[in-house]
Image (tube, grey):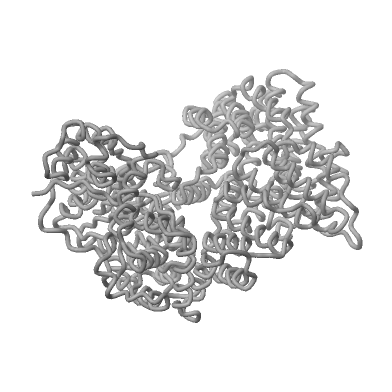
Amino acid sequence: MPATNTNTDARTDPPADPCTAAQAVTAADADAGADVLIGRQDDMRRLDALLDAARRGRGGALVLRGEPGIGKSALLNHLHRAAGGLLVMRASGAEFEMELPFAALHQLLAPVTGRLAGLPAPHRTALQVAFGLGTGVPDPFLVGVGALGLLTEIAAERPLLCLVDDAQWLDQASAKALAFLARRIAAEPIALVFAAREESGLPELAGLSAHFLHGLGESDARALLGTAVRAPLDERVRDRILAEARGNPLALVELPRTAGLAGMAGGFAEPDSVPAVIEQSFRSRLELLDPPARLLVTVAAADPIGDPGLLWRAAELLDIDAPAVAGSVPLVEFGTRIRFSHPLARSAAYRAATPQDRRRAHEALAAATDPVADPDRRAWHRAQASAGPDDQVAAALEASATRAQERGGIAAAAAFLERAAALTADPARRAERVLAAVQAKLSVGDFDAAADLLTTVPGDDPGRAARADLLRGKLSFARRRGDEDPTAHLLRAAARLAATDPDRSRECYLDAVEMGVLLGGLDHVVEAARNASPADGPATAATRLLSGVTALVAGEGHRAAGAVLGPVVADPDDGVWAARPSLGYLLAAEFWNFDSMHGIAARTVAAGRRTGSFHALPIGLAMQATTTVHTGDFGTATELISEEEALADATGAAPLVYPRLHLAALRGRRAQALELFASVDQRMTLSVQWATAVLGNGLADYPAALEAARRAVEYGAVGTAGLALPELVEAAVRCGERETAAEALALLQARTGAGGHAWGLGVEAYARALVTEDEHAYQEAIALLEDGTLAVYRARAHLLYGEWLRRQGRRRDARTALRRAHETLSDLGVEAFAERAAGELRATGEQARSRTSNASDQLTLQEMHIARLVADGATSKEVAARLFLSPRTVDAHLRNIFRKLGLTSRRQLRDLPGIR
């Protein structure tokens, strides 16, 4: 049998077409004759093991990586041939479809879209919208879950092999969805294999298991060359070919065709790279064609969808007898689809054409495209046919961008807008279109392209220059790099708008304030914001917010700032927080307003669920989890943390760790907490200091608590520093540093007094009691913290009061307070503080009741979340949809839960104390 290693994987340069329709590609029957892949035995064994695991019900994903022509596609074909007993589904990325959302996912799932009817309605609708079978904006969450559900339903009948070639050209939406699938098929009989360049540029694939393909060894390379060149070969020629090819299988086949064997022997200019060698081989064959044939090939290369009807109509407009010419054209298959033999063949055909011929090809394709059925593709071809500015074409592209955005194709909209700007003659209109393109590119994470476009925006108009600065600030924040702090761009935008649009100027200052709170440098921001123009007419929430934060940071005191900020912070439904939830949440914490913290978090979660925002929902879940931790409802907090982490895993983002820090600190398990504290990113240092202080106070390690609390307070961050103050008071009193405790109490009183809410006032009362040893202050704290949502803090007040009573020799009264503290803290799972209360009880002569073992002691966060959902009556499918898992994965987790808890049924789980 012939030995083949040719591989279809290389760069093309024809214009990327954002409106290419997804083509359903069913898996062709594998060739009956399995070619031998020379030198790839180890690679084939790795892939065969993946197949065997899928047959046994264990799924897995793998990314084959290597340079163009190295053999990735050949190995995918080997997998297809070896997949006896498996259903094979294939898709391939295409450079000209990279801006079209869900194109590759549609291609993969097209053979089974007839099964959509069996999915739950939300998942079915999401996939139909994503694939253009329904109207609306596709929900990325539901698309991923729907695709997983569809594949797992099919895999329940027959194991699956999914092959994705040229993955470096996947559209972003498909890449996210496929990476999501890859991370969730471990419990399913599904094998998913990608083939991608060594540097694919797709972060979605970065976390998946990879297998790198290298060049063939010398003996294998010689063997493959021998199959490619049957004639006797001079040793010098052979050595030159082997040296040039560097073990690349496709180069070994194509190099002899590039300059002929005589050229190889005589020496010729060394190409830039192996892909250049391969492309030159294709171009040399195209150069032999007559002009009509070359023009036909150019038209085929310029049309990414491969529609023969469109090609024949365009050829007729160019006076080409396509049926007669097609038979003599190499490298192109003219059938039910127009296909090039290799991606570089298409690239070579397009690049070899003159600019005039390329424009003629696009002009003919535009004329042959139905303006009603496919206006976007027609506009795109007209744009490529334009040699200079054309306002009519630019307007058509802008309309295409609007349509793309409506169906969720932000990347396509960005491409349309960028080209529209290039074809716009009027400088002002061109700048507007550039700014719109930059916003779209920021939305899809194309930061480098956005930065390049921003350099073309003139600064002659203050409004546009300010918008450009705003976009630069967002870009700098997103990339976390650059010569300037992100806030500098926002402040410059605010200054530009101050005279012409003071309302927008203040909005810019507010955005800079939030960024300063999150990244640091708030003092500088507030100093600049003092120059903001006063508002005309009644004060709005935005003007009060800016004025209040300025007063707070400028040192005018919490009481003065609170008088301005109080009404805004007290209204979590105010629209000013919709765009700045983090700022609202931290200001609510600064003034110890628990209701507003909870309200802002809940609203952010609701908005995130409603819009499907990858940005808002994780932030909202993390904030809601944190406030729930402080109520002592660790079970619900665990669910929220688990959901946020599942969402982060589904999108490839890093999970937000601060809710886990709060949970670990209050739960008080020393070893687990310290391990978590040591593992978090340097940027979370302030939260770690607060958590260390709480943990230290719970464990009665007061020196450690004192040091950590002091550092947190000294940093002075809005929100977190204020929460550390009562920990500093408690630790300082226990360490005998009365002056430090008194100073911290004064700072706390400034915040809680300005806020005037029960949570803060109750905590201030027990902190005051620690410093003054005033019994009435302890009793005041207990009364203020009577609200059930403040149970943790009420129990801590009882603990402190009981400790003080015992030290006063009032054992009987101490036992009552300590017993209440111990019971509440034990029931809530606040273990360190509960053990501290138990120790104090023993000192009074009373033995504390033993804590009943809780299910949460034995389960992971995710297992606890699944157990609670199932206990509430959710089915495996419902849990899977909630946590972006497959039903089989949920069942596997349930088996682990049953084993750990000694259960055998879901009913027993529902009846288990501490689960629901």
Of all residues shown, which one is farthest toward the top? 736
Q: Is residue 628 left or right of residue 287?
A: right
Q: How many marks?
A: 0
Report x, y in % for residue 289.
31, 62
In the image, residue 490 sits, relative to residue 319, either above or below, namely above
Report x, y in % for residue 564.
85, 50
Residue at 54% x, 60% y: name it.
415
Along the viewing direction, whichever of 584 and 698 lies nearer the viewer: 584
Report x, y in % for residue 362.
47, 68
Q: Is residue 782 left or right of residue 244?
A: right
Residue at 74% x, 19% y: name it.
737
Along the viewing direction, whichever of 554 and 710 lies nearer the viewer: 554
Of all residues shown, which one is farthest toward the left? 1
Residue 161 appears anywhere in the view = yes
* Residue 322 lies in quadrant: bottom left
Along the viewing direction, whichever of 340 and 105 lies nearer the viewer: 340
Q: Is residue 54 left or right of residue 657?
A: left
In the image, residue 747 sits, relative to residue 872, either above or below, namely above
Q: Is residue 437 left or right of residue 7?
A: right
* Residue 877 lies in quadrant: bottom left
Report x, y in % for residue 228.
17, 45
Residue at 56% x, 66% y: name it.
386
Residue 871 appears anywhere in the view = no
Along the viewing direction, whichever of 41 and 204 lies nearer the viewer: 41
